Amino acid sequence: MTRISVGDASLTNVLARQGAELRGQVQRASQEIATGRHSDIGQVMRGDVAPLLAVDASLARLAAYRTNTTDAAFQTAAQQSAVAGLSQLAAGITVTLMGARDFPTPAQISATAADARGRLASAVGFINMQASGRAVFSGVATDTAPLGRVEDMLAALQTAAATSTTAGQVEAAVNGWFADPLGFGTFYQGGAPISAAPIAPEEAADLSTTAMDPAIRDTLAGFAMAALIDLGLLAGNTEERGRLAQIAGQTLHQTEDARITLAARIGTVEGQIESARTRNAAEATSLGILRSDIGSVDSYEAATRLENVRAQLESLYLVTARVSRLSLTEFMR
């Protein structure tokens, strides 16, 4: 029977501890070779991790800016598309409406009015456009379409112009309703304008455009005047119906500059957002490289260290194996 002395037991414990330590070194070296990063950044930086934390904080801030710029880019692109759509709708009927008083038959006025009514519905559809599931002209109420049904708008305008007998009176009633906080202001279902969105250090994008913008509101008024003709307003008075169609065309023509200005304003914000995205991406790339360099490991040094530790571990296993076989018989051999 093999007898182990106190000295043998102590040696066994020492060998076991050394084996555990060497196995840990092998695991760490293998991990560093596989990932290319130090397993203990704190040890490499001698406990001063402030530079690393500063880089991580900057990267986190840039990630937030990236989210903001992405959302803002979607919103402004959708708004730009909607304003372009309004301009195309207006351009397709403005000249025809302005020449309505010269139409030889009432049927032509009616046909043009019906076209205007359909364009009004399309215009409302553009204003109710969404980007990534959010209404882009509703201000802070992004989960709500800014405008209600076209039929409800026209019904309210019919009521406002019910006593009108001339084109001028209808024009005043329509413009009054669109300017009235209890008219179009109530029909608008969105919220207050969105606050400027931070897109870069000390820089924010203006996303405050809503369906209450005068360029949008006045364009809708122009379509609405002509659409009311299709609903029978001023029926029987061909002269005034032609006059109202002409006024509607003039309104759409006069609002062209406002739409161009609105598109330019949104385009300026788009350019600002894209510029910020480019700068932020470049900074994030630079910081990412710096972050990688801080924690990177010399692969050659790590591989050399791994081989050395493996050699030590193999030697330790040989010693451990020989110690485990010690007995009087083995000692006498």
Image (cartoon, rainbow, N blue to C red):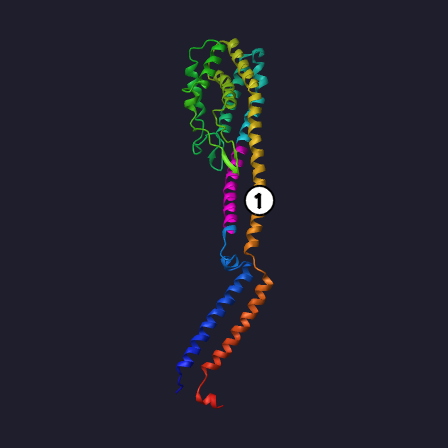
- In this rendering, is residue 314 above or below 48? below
Dot 1 crowding, Cα within 10 Å, few <14, some 14–19, many 20+: some
Q: In the structure shown, which secondary structural element does the residue marked by tag 1 occupy?
A: helix
Q: Indicate the position of residue 218 as horizontal and vertical percent values.
A: 51, 20
Task: Say if residue 160 shows up in the picture.
Answer: yes
Amino acid on which the number 1 mark rests in the picture: Glu
- In this rendering, is residue 298 above or below 310? above
Task: Say if residue 92 shows up in the picture.
Answer: no
The residue lying toward the viewer, choosing from 108 and 257, is 257
- In this rendering, is residue 86 above or below 22? above
Q: Chief secondary structure of the magenta span? A: helix
Choose top left, top right, bottom left or bottom right for residue 256: top right
Q: Indicate the position of residue 73 as horizontal and vertical percent values.
A: 54, 36
Q: Indicate the position of residue 172 as horizontal and vertical percent values.
A: 47, 13
- In this rendering, is residue 330 above or below 236? below
Query: Which residue range is magenta in the image?
Result: 52-78
Residue at x 54% of width, y 71% of height? 310
Residue at x 47% of width, y 90% of height? 332
Q: How many numbered badges does the structure rendering display?
A: 1
Q: Indicate the position of residue 292 as horizontal and vertical percent values.
A: 56, 53
Q: In the rendered view of the protein, which quadrant contains the N terminus?
A: bottom left
The residue lying toward the viewer, choosing from 39 and 236, is 39
Residue underneath mark 1: 283
The residue lying toward the viewer, choosing from 316 and 46, is 46
Instruction: Based on the picture, tell me whether residue 139 belongs to the magenta stretch.
Output: no
